[in-house]
Amino acid sequence: MFNVRVYGILINDEKQVLVSDEYIRGNYYTKFPGGGLEFGEGTRECLKREFKEEMDLDVRVGEHLYTTDFFQMSAFNPQHQIISIYYFAHPLEAIKAPLRQNPFEFDEKQMAVYHDKQETETFRFINRELFSAESVTLPIDKVVAELVKKCL
């Protein structure tokens, strides 16, 4: 079984990289914004939907950066193979979602969401000098982080 994920690389004018800090099923993850492809949608549509759902942000999906080219088993379901597709994302409006300074800086509203869904997330920018593969948690994201670092 394949699990297709679509992620956005959003770099602001200061050359900072947007990441999502997530608390899922008792574990902490730092990853690129995005999520699962739904049946009937294209990958670019998926990324636009994910940014709208997660950040209430309209984006233009730009150039394709990377698609997984190695086997990666899902951390949540060993019966699933993960295929991740990464695009550059460009905001079409100012970011309204709260941006944090520190990793996993969840507020009360976000923790209330966690108790309902068993997951929550928050967002922050990482300065280009500090951004690296170690900035993100997931194995495929680490590969992409190295590619992004070359763009900064």
Image: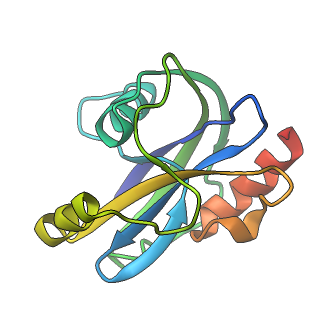
Is 50 on the left-hand or right-hand side of 82? left
Residue beneath the point at 69% across and 36% down: 11
Instruction: Decide which of 102, 37 is in the foreground and name it.
Output: 102
Regarding residue 149, the answer to whether it shows in the image is yes
Seen as rendered, the residue at the extreme left is: 116
Is 31 on the left-hand or right-hand side of 131? left
Number of labels in the image equals 0
Vertical placement of residue 107 versus 5, above or below: below
Residue 46 pos. (x, y %):
37, 33
Regarding residue 1, the answer to whether it shows in the image is no
Instruction: Decide which of 4, 88 is in the foreground and name it.
Output: 88
Seen as rendered, the residue at the extreme bottom is: 26
Vertical placement of residue 11 versus 2, above or below: above
The quadrant of the rendering that contains the C terminus is top right
Residue 81 pos. (x, y %):
43, 65
Residue beneath the point at 23% across and 58% down: 109
Instruction: Decide which of 143, 3 is in the foreground and name it.
Output: 143
Q: Quadrant of residue 72?
A: bottom right
Residue beneath the point at 26% across and 40% down: 38
Vertical placement of residue 33 versus 58, above or below: below
Residue 133 pos. (x, y %):
75, 65
Instruction: Decide which of 2, 11 is in the foreground and name it.
Output: 11
Q: Quadrant of residue 101?
A: bottom right
The quadrant of the rendering that contains the N terminus is bottom left
Residue 23 pos. (x, y %):
37, 71
